Amino acid sequence: MRAVLASPVVVLLLCLCGILVVSVCSQAGSGGTLSWGPSIPGPLSRSASEGTSSEEDTAASRPLAVFSDVEEGWRREEVSLLSQHFGDTPILISFSRGGPRGGTFSSMQAEYALRDHFHYTVGESFEFVEYQDGEEPLAIAVRSYRFTEEDVLYHDHVQVVLTREDDEWVISEIRAAED
């Protein structure tokens, strides 16, 4: 067998799409055969606590790591765990209570909006219960919280959407809606 090099344009497009090309080979007399690396399960098909090996740590597995940071940050009310995944892409933030009712914010503005939200609310629980893979992966969490000056327990769903920015997944949307 001899190695066949793919066009630099094809390689660039594949990299931008998050596809890992492990090898391109040809078989004697049969033309080139494109061979993809080990089968990679959907990026959200395993739990965040399982970890990944170096072979599995591909662009396709990174959304789950971002969602894991978001979940942990929300539980601990640490904005830095969320804001580390903000990029240059404007972030849509919408809360049914205790925050912006809808708007697009820069990463700095989004960080301040979340700081205010965590300041005026006390999180009781936050857990992602649904994940959807795709060009813009999303996760939906169920959340319970109280306002610092109230004793009423509220429940809602928080949807977090990611988008690609260069070679990283960044948060593009955070929406909370009541049950």
Image (cartoon, helix red, strand yellow):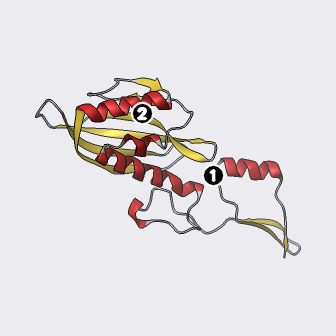
- Residue 128 circle label: none
Nearest to the observer: residue 3 or residue 81: 81
Query: Disc 2 versus disc 1: distance between alpha carbons?
Result: 27 Å
Q: Disc 2 marks which amino acid? A: Glu
Query: Compared to 157, does 90 lie above or below?
Result: above
Residue pushed farthest left? 151
Farthest-out residue, right: 29
**Element marked by disc 2:** helix
Percent across and percent down for residue 138 are 44, 44
Assess whether mark 1 and mark 2 are in contact (beta carbons under 8 angstroms). no
Q: Position of residue 32 (x, y in %)?
A: 82, 65
- Residue 144, placed above or below residue 113: below
Judge depth for marks 2 and 1 and give the one in front: 2
Instruction: Report the front residue among 112 and 53.
Output: 112
Which one is earlier in the sequence, the residue at label 2 or at label 1?
A: 1
Coordinates of residue 158 in the picture (x, y in percent): 33, 39
| Kind of residue indicated by mark 1 | Gly
- Residue displayed at 84% across by 61% down: 5
Question: Which of 72/112 is in front?
Answer: 112
Residue at left 70%, top 61%?
21
Query: Nearest the camera: 179 or 48?
Result: 48
Classify 56 as above or below 111.
below
Circle 2 sits on which residue? 111
Residue drawn 46% across the image and 50% down it: 66
Say what secondary structure mark 1 lies in.
loop
Residue 132: tell me if it is visible: no
* Residue 87 relative to residue 28: left or right: left
- Residue in view at x 39 percent, y 30 percent: 112
Question: In the rendering, which numbered label is found on residue 18?
Answer: 1
* Circle 1 crowding by C-alpha within 10 Å: few under 14, some 14–19, many from 20: some
